Image: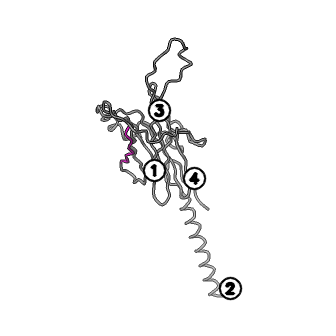
Amino acid sequence: MMTYSRFLSSIAATVFLLNSAYALAEANEASWYSIEYIVFENTPLINQPLEVWNKEPFQMPADAIALEPSSGNKSFSSLSTQQQQLHGVYRRLEKLSSYTPIAHGGWIQPVRNKQKRKSVSIIHQMGTDRLEGTLTFHRGRFLHLSVDLQLNEMLPLAINNNYAADTITPPSTLYRLTESRRIKTSQSNYFDHPRFGVLAIVEKINSPTPNTSTP
């Protein structure tokens, strides 16, 4: 027959196991965030030389994530127009002669502790110029947003009639912005480069997926 002390020990062990299970489940539970960004060009002054911060061309990672169409409840799905909150900022940038907005978007994403970082691919074509790169939202001890974007600016091309136009590769200038920064939710985060910049805001949101019970 079990003694009273052994009974108490058994109860304590059971409580410890339950608490450990709940703590593990809580640690593995994902927190959901919305990430919204605006990329804009800085209009250079006349005869103002611009520094090419990084001359190494950007290479899109093989595992970069292409955003899914807006669905409202799927990981790495695009923010709908109604979910975006930087429309006013975008319109103000359009009215300023010093800036030209070139990309506006965002997505929702779950984040867990010690999770492998997942980069989102950003590709946008503006005439002959091209913006490409990645944005990576991740959590270590704190929340971080990492930017790796490249603006490929085509230069005017002098056509030589002796050659077919489609055999000539226009010269270009590469401007690359790479920066990782600790961020706080509900605050504007600005990543600066002489040629272009990024404005981003991160919000914690409710999980769009239904909760599942843990045995």
The quarter in which the N terminus is drawn is bottom right
Earlier sequence position, callout 4 versus callout 2: 2
Residue stretch in magenta: 188-194
Q: Which mark is residue 180?
A: 1
Q: Residues within 10 Å of mark 4 (few under 14, many from 20)?
A: few
Q: Which circle, 1 or 4, is nearer the viewer?
A: 1
Q: Which circle, 3 or 1, is nearer the viewer?
A: 3
Which amino acid type is marked by label 3? Asn
Tell me residue 211's x, y (percent). Answer: 54, 53
Earlier sequence position, callout 2 versus callout 3: 2
**Residue hosting label 4:** 116
Tell me residue 61's x, y (percent). Answer: 58, 42
Tell me residue 34's x, y (percent). Answer: 45, 46
Q: Residues within 10 Å of mark 1 (few under 14, many from 20)?
A: some
**Distance from Cα at disc 2 to Cα at disc 3:** 77 Å
Disc 1 element = strand
**Distance from Cα at disc 4 to Cα at disc 3:** 29 Å
Earlier sequence position, callout 3 versus callout 1: 3
Earlier sequence position, callout 1 versus callout 2: 2
Q: Name which residue lies at 40% across and 39% down.
A: 51
**Residue hosting label 2:** 2
In this figure, which colouring scheme has been used for the structure?
Answer: one colour
Q: Residues within 10 Å of mark 3 (few under 14, many from 20)?
A: many
Is residue 190 shown in magenta? yes
Quarter residue 200 falls in = top left
Disc 4 element = loop
Earlier sequence position, callout 1 versus callout 4: 4
Rendered position, 167 above or below 46: above
